[in-house]
Image (cartoon, helix red, strand yellow):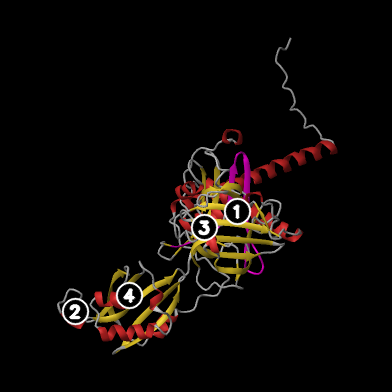
Amino acid sequence: MDTRQTPQPAQAQVALSPQEEAALLAQQARRRRARLRFTLAVFAGLAMMGWLAGQLLVPDMPTPVLSAKPAPSAPALATRWASLVPMQRSYESDSLVAGDSLAALLARAGIDGVEADAALDVLRTQFDPRKLKVGQKVRVFSEWPNNIATDNTAENDTKRFAGFDFIPEPRQRLIVRRTGHLDFDVVKQDRPLSERFFFTDTLISSSVYEAARGGGMSPNLVVELIRLFSFSIDFQRDMREGDQLEVLFTRRFDENNQLAEEGDIIFAALTNRGKRYAYWRLAHDDGTHSYYDDAGRSVQRLLMKTPVDGARLSSRFGMRRHPILGYTRLHRGLDFAAPRGTPIYAAGDGQIVALGRNGDFGKYIRIRHRNGYETAYAHMNGYARRLKKGARVKQGQVIGYVGSTGLATGPHLHYEVLRHKKPVNPRDLEVPAQRSLADAGLEKLRTAQSAIGSRINALATDDNRLLSLPRRSANAAR
């Protein structure tokens, strides 16, 4: 029996159906697309890594910032004095003192009288030097030829008076420059100022004035702040320790980053006894501005309740025993004790109908306002300049100064309000707002409120506000 195995024939190739062949081709196509996507992803990743390496490792090149505004023209000073021989220059600074004058300052600097007079004569064509105030800073310049070294003793022999300059107002510099033998020229140079915002949020411990000053506000701006709230709040009776003050205000700086002038109050809020009074500054199309509450009512009222700053209420409205005459009679107004010379403001827009001495009232002014109102101011020490009967005054305008003329025991202001010739208590006044915004004005106010809110939030985020006491709740402030 033959036990050898017979070799098996090779397996025959299996034939594919048309459907199976189509599926195989589709699978091969998907694999090719996957390989292509993978290749593209690798190249994209390499390109991204190269870009990141360039950003992180290659030093930044300066990129020009283009502006749609035209380039500024050459300074007028450069063209006006371009023909002058170049000289080396130096200056010394000095300030006016009490009883001083610009001529005296120049003499103190060693300037020859003839040269000083020639320079002052040119200055007077543009500015009256008598208007300069105590503390005004003046720079006095000297010049000498370029070919003399600054450490050469010959410098003193060739040095001459070159002129002076000063800043009479924040946005302007006056320059007097020598152009020849006893010849001088004067120019007014504009000073561009940049405005910055500041925000203070503090609790009141003694007074609004002290809180605002502690928050960095200037005295003049604090006075404006007090006037702003004086229409709604009685600072003599209403203020409490723990009341909260919030103010957004501006300051303006020169090109040397030096404070040039105080700016404006943009927003102010005072939480008094749990009630919050908030006012926003809104500019009008005619260039004026007012402060409005959230309902669009102007903070300014027809009359101010307190037409003098920093005063103490010394006598109320009503029946009282007269401190000099000794008998009881109606006290038709309020008495505000204040230092002699304290400014007195017009309580509202109006026309002066009486000005002069008035018996026991001493020096006296009465102003007629709208809606049948009149205000009277007595025992004044003196009147503001250029005031006379028939003159029109604006609310907040200084009309006189506290004194003790007439029948008075000490310096104070006697303040009266009359309605149709009848006396009323100034503290009980409920006069309407001077203006209320219409729909278009309200929409403008909402835009201003949004911008102001963003500004305050940005200052808080950047930690660019002044430090303040911790905020207290309305209930805790009562």
Q: Residue at x 42, y 81 (%)?
A: 187
Name the residue type under label 2. Answer: Glu
| Residue that badge 3 annotates | 250
Q: Secondary structure at mark 4?
A: loop
- Residue, disc 1: 333
Q: Quadrant of the C terminus?
A: top right
> Where does the image place residue 384, in percent across and percent down from the top left?
50, 68
Residue 189 forms part of the magenta stretch: no
Amino acid at circle 3: Thr
Residue at mark 3 to residue at mark 4: CA–CA distance: 33 Å
Magenta stretch: give its range: 260-289
Describe residue 388's horizontal placement relative to residue 98 as left or right.
Answer: right
SS at mark 3?
strand
C-alpha span from label 2 to label 4: 29 Å
Query: From mark 3 to mark 1, how far is it between C-alphas?
Result: 38 Å
Instruction: Give the tally of numbered discs.
Output: 4
Nearest-to-viewer mark from 3 and 4? 4
Kind of residue at disc 4? Ser
Q: Nearer the viewer, mark 3 or mark 1?
A: 1
Q: Which residue is mark 2?
A: 155
Label whose residue precedes the other's in the sequence (1 or 2):
2
Residue 244 percent location from the top left of the image: 55, 42
Q: Residue at x 28, y 85 (%)?
A: 115
Mark 4 and mark 1 residues within 8 Å of each other at the beta carbon: no
Other-residue count near label 3 (Cα within 10 Å), few / some / many at <14 / 14–19 / ≥20: some
* Residue bearing the label numbered 4: 101
- Mark 2 Cα shell of 10 Å, populated few (<14), some (14-19), many (≥20): some
Q: Would you say 154 lies left or right of 146 here?
A: left
Mark 4 or mark 1, whichever is nearer to me: 1
